[in-house]
Amino acid sequence: MNSLSEANAQFAVDLFQQLRKSYKGNIFYSPLSISSALAMTYLGAQGNTALQIGKNNSNYRKINNLFPSGSLNSAILVLVNAVYFKGQWNVKFNKEYTAEEKFWLTKLEDKLTAEKLVEWTSSQNMSEKKVNLHLPRFKVEESYDLTGTLKSMGMVDALNSQDANFLGMAERRDLELTTMVHKSFVEVNEEGTEAAAATGIGIGVTSAPIYESFRCDHPFLFFIKHNKTNSILFLGRVSSP
């Protein structure tokens, strides 16, 4: 595990543990995108402000009305991050088999650590296996004002007009990070991509293979990652599909 993916995983888990204190339902965000935005702010920060940002930094149609009317009237410096993702399957799920089922509760995230996140999502620890997948359709659209969350994670000075130091981007001393908004959207359903509309239908006399069932009938965490760098691009929790 290289230092970049390790830091990315640590930031992803730290942010998730903070968010789940305030958000009891679905959660979806991009830790890599947020940390990249913080990196741009870090370039203009100096002194203790830079140290605190660096500590927490690892190195569109669906997204509208990011800021409510009047929310930026007194803003001096605003950091905005928006993410859109729509998951598609290589092969479609058959909608004829879509049905209502029970959805149970679990406490998986209590055991979530950066080390376990890297272990669970490492391609070296994964193997391909054909299963009968029972996965709920879900659509998650979330908007977070991360200013309070980042304060809880130690980034205090940047959000305080008395202590903020952004002399690296402007000569004025009254700059502060007033708002950090992160809005994200993900949708997963039965559909697949048109380019991969290949169905595995064969005609013969052999028996149909029996696959192990994998049922997502309880709250679950999901990740979208970049395999080459083992970086978590998106992290989410589905508790009410």
Image (spheres, grey):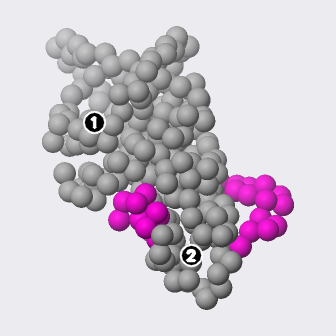
Q: Main secondary structure of the magenta part?
A: loop
Q: Does the segment drawn in magenta span residue 201?
A: no
* Closest to the observer, 22 or 31: 22
Q: Where in the figure is residue 16, as x and y percent of width and height?
A: 47, 41
**What residue is shown at x 61% (from left), y 43% (from top)?**
142
Quarter in which the C terminus is drawn: top right
Whether residue 157 is visible: yes
Q: Amino acid at mark 1?
A: Lys
Q: Residue tagged by mark 1? A: 116
**Residue range of the region highlighted in magenta in the rendering:** 50-76
**What residue is shown at x 33% (from left), y 48% (from top)?**
9
Against 10, is 212 above or below? above
Disc 2 to disc 1, C-alpha distance: 36 Å
In-image side of 234 versus 60 (left or right): left
For marks 2 and 1 on the same chain, the one whose residue lies earlier in the sequence: 1
Q: Where in the figure is residue 125, as x and y percent of width and height?
A: 17, 37
Q: Amino acid at mark 2?
A: Asn
**What residue is shown at x 77% (from left), y 65% (from top)?**
72
* Closest to the observer, 5 or 184: 5
The answer to which quarter of the image holds residue 224 is top left
Specify the label residue 165 is tagged with. 2
